[in-house]
Image (spheres, rainbow, N blue to C red):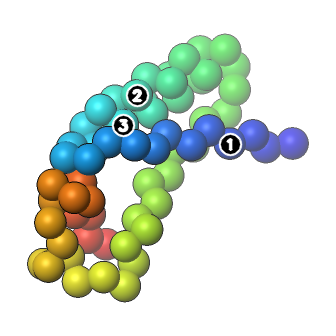
């Protein structure tokens, strides 16, 4: 049965979340678990040019 770990939070930079998720994934891999990282963008239909990075964090355009 798959298990999920969600890493959320932060405002200005997603660097801390990325490092945390990568480190946690590596620790789980070292314990013999299969790990897949996925970044979800909740602003799928929002114009990134009008978003304030101080309110919403780093703009990620797909």
Residue annotated with mark 1: 4
Residue 48, position as x, y percentages in the image: 20, 76
Please name the residue shown 19% across and 46% down the image: 12
Disc 2 to disc 3, C-alpha distance: 5 Å
Query: Relative to residue 40, is residue 15 drawn left or right?
Result: left
The disc placed on residue 20 is 2
Foreground of the two, 36 or 13: 13
Please name the residue shown 31% across and 72% down the image: 62
Disc 2 to disc 1, C-alpha distance: 15 Å
Query: Relative to residue 12, is residue 34 drawn left or right?
Result: right
Up-down relation of residue 56 to residue 4 (above or below):
below
Foreground of the two, 57 or 22: 57
Residue 46, position as x, y percentages in the image: 30, 82
The quarter of the picture where the N terminus appears is top right
Asked if marks 2 and 3 touch (Cβ < 8 Å), the reply is yes
Q: How many labels does the image show?
A: 3
Residue annotated with mark 3: 17
């Amino acid at each position: 049965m798959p298990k999920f770990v969600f890493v959320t939070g932060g405002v200005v930079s997603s660097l801390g979340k990325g490092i945390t998720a990568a480190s946690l994934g590596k620790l789980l891999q070292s314990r013999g678990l299969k790990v897949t990282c996925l970044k979800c963008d909740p602003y799928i239909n929002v114009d990134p040019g009008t978003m304030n990075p101080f309110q919403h964090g780093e703009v990620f355009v797909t």
